[in-house]
Amino acid sequence: TVHKVGYLIGSLAKESINRKLAKALVQLAPESLKMAEIPFRDLPLYSYDYDADFPPPAKAFKKALAEVDAVLFVTPEYNRSIPGGLKNAIDWASRPYGTNSFTRKPSAVIGTSPGAIGTAVAQQSLRSVLSFCNSPQMNAPEAYIQFKPGLITEDGEVSDKTTEEFLRTYMEQFATFITRVYTAIPKETV
Ligand code: FNR
């Protein structure tokens, strides 16, 4: 079965290493996954004052989430948590009350950092948020990628074979996880 996956890149930086990682993941994903970025940089800072009438970027963001079968988070760690921009995007997606975009939408979390912890602390924080948002999360494999210069090129080429194989397996496992979620609970019925 073909599944659409929307991916959110937690970093807004031009030279983002997480953007490079996302590029690699798109290339290594099995054919059954149709990958597309869901951008969030144009979202204003969320307030529930907007709930009565979401601005166009927020409507577009929620529509994009509604159109995918699963969500992949590729995020850096900022001060041992997720970047504020990503949290803001999740807050938009979760509202207005009763229209939470993540409910029963399978997700996976991955990230890279030059530090040895490889975004592990940010990922735990994100998992807690996604739990509250009722997203079924792929628990394993976990992926904490320590970024060394040249590990992934601008074109998303992974220079280290072991890492490349690991990332390929990660995406295959995500495809399996998504299929399992929709097999257990057919989409038509939720
Ligand atoms: C960081 N960095 C960082 N790294 C880490 O492993 N744990 C952390 O808590 C933090 N905190 C942090 C805060 C802020 C505000 C910045 C700008 C950076 C370093 C970070 O991993 C590095 O800048 C990466 O390059 C960020 O990923 P992107 O944005 O290049 O994808």
Image: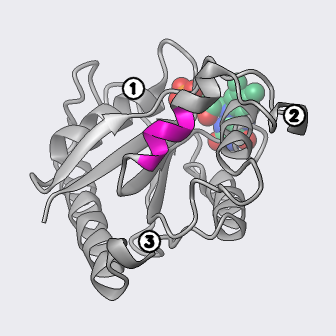
Which portion, as a residue range, is magenta?
61-66
- Residue occupied by mark 2: 47
Give the residue type that dot 3 points to: Met
Closer to viewer: mark 3 or mark 2? 2
Give the residue type that dot 1 points to: Pro
Which residue is nearer to you in this view: 83 or 65? 65
Identify which residue is drawn at 79% across, 40% down.
79
Q: Tell me the chief SS of the magenta region.
A: helix
Q: Residues within 10 Å of mark 3 (few under 14, many from 20)?
A: some
Mark 1 vs ligand 1: CB under 8 Å? no
Q: Is 139 contained in the magenta span?
A: no
Q: Quadrant of residue 106?
A: bottom left
- Percent across and percent down for residue 130 are 64, 62
Which residue is nearer to you in this view: 52 or 112? 52
Q: How is the image coloured?
A: one colour
Q: Of the two numbered discs 1 and 2 on the same chain, state the one appearing first in sequence.
A: 2
Q: Do the numbered discs 3 and 2 sit on residues whose CB atoms are within 8 Å?
A: no
Element type at mark 2:
loop
Element type at mark 1:
loop
- Residue occupied by mark 3: 138
- Residue occupied by mark 1: 149
Q: Of the two numbered discs 3 and 2 on the same chain, state the one appearing first in sequence.
A: 2
- Percent across and percent down for residue 145 are 44, 49
Identify which residue is drawn at 67% across, 23% down.
43
Q: Quadrant of residue 46?
A: top right
Which quadrant of the figure contains the N terminus? Answer: bottom left
Relative placement, left or right, of 42 versus 172 is right
- Percent across and percent down for residue 92 are 70, 40
- Percent across and percent down for residue 24 are 26, 37
3D distance between C-alphas at marks 3 and 2:
30 Å
3D distance between C-alphas at marks 3 and 1:
28 Å
